[in-house]
Amino acid sequence: KNDCPDQAVDLCRVVLENLDCVFTKNQVGRDEEALSERLEATAKIEHDDEYMQLVIYLPLMDDREKLQSMTILTRLCGYFMILQDKQSFAMIVSRMARWTFHYGLSLESPVVFAYYAISFIIRGDFAAGALNGWIALSLLEEFSNRKAKARTIFLVWYYVLPWSRHIRDSERPLIAGYHFATDCGDTRMSFFCIFGKLIADLISGRPLRQIDDVCRAFVPQIAQSELVGTLMRILWQTVLNLIGQCEDVNKLVGEGWNELEIALEESPHSPYVKNHFKAFKSYLYLFNGEHKRSV
């Protein structure tokens, strides 16, 4: 279901209903209120160490159905990010946060706090986002879950910490995430980590020829994964444009990608891919001095 997020969401909802994890109007309201209160409380914390210790020493969740539900909820978060459904994403994060602080930690907690950190980033609170991102990484030391390790590293070092750390700080962790994902057979996440690392390379000013070489090596391998494969090809064509291997620097048309022939609207990942596509186009406009078009 990785390349069919709509179908995956429907399947997850069926499984959650069987586990009595439903989202009625009243429950959604309670989840959103709890998340809002928790976000505001976290943002006001003056001593980061105190909050980190509070989280790390939470009890372990022992309700089997809730443990199973948490696994499905973390998957749903990922699908809603792909679909760019911010309201549903916030709803799921709120449920996971409320359960974690009420019932305790689980094997999914590193991923839960990674998504929790992203919630702060969306609100523009980068300090609180970074704090919860570090907590997510700290929890990796408490739980032996290799798949969660790779996904947590990607979420934190791609979406969260670049807002408060130098972008080059993301490079080594994302390479480590690639190896963790590869070792446990999570090919898709390993490619996401490589994609994130190449983004960090591009933004931090690494030689474009080096990025081109890596793209050429990985693009054929990623062809089976539509989402990350598409993102990698768009990135590759952006690099080719910057090198000068194009007719128009502002159009992603060439060996890696052809924006004139491929309709993004037909992709099941259309919202997520289109946002990245717009970001790359803005990067090219800036490079070409067309600042108004980059906005």
Image (cartoon, helix red, strand yellow):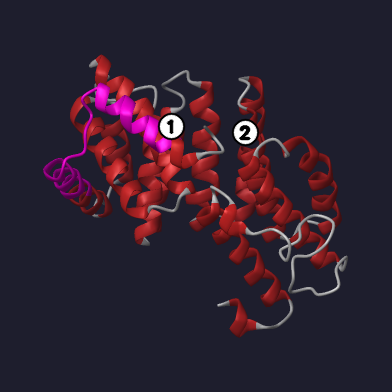
- Asked if the residues shown at circle 2 and circle 1 are in contact, with their CB atoms under 8 angstroms apart, the answer is no
Q: Is residue 17 magenta?
A: yes
Label 2 and label 1: CA atoms lie apart by 24 Å
132 is higher (above) or lower (below) than 105: below
Query: Would you name the residue on which mark 1 appears?
Result: 138
Tell me which label, 2 or 1, sits earlier in the chain: 1
- Please report the residue visible at 70 percent of the width from the left and 56 percent of the height from the top: 234
- The three-letter amino acid code for the residue at tag 1 is Ser
- Please report the residue visible at 25 percent of the width from the left and 27 percent of the height from the top: 17
**Is residue 218 something one can see in this rendering?**
yes
Q: Secondary structure at mark 1?
A: helix
Query: Going by the image, does 213 lie left or right of 50?
Result: right
Q: Position of residue 8 (x, y in %)?
A: 44, 34
Residue bounds of the magenta highlight? 8-35
| Most common secondary structure along the magenta stretch | helix
Task: Give the label on residue 8, or none.
Answer: none
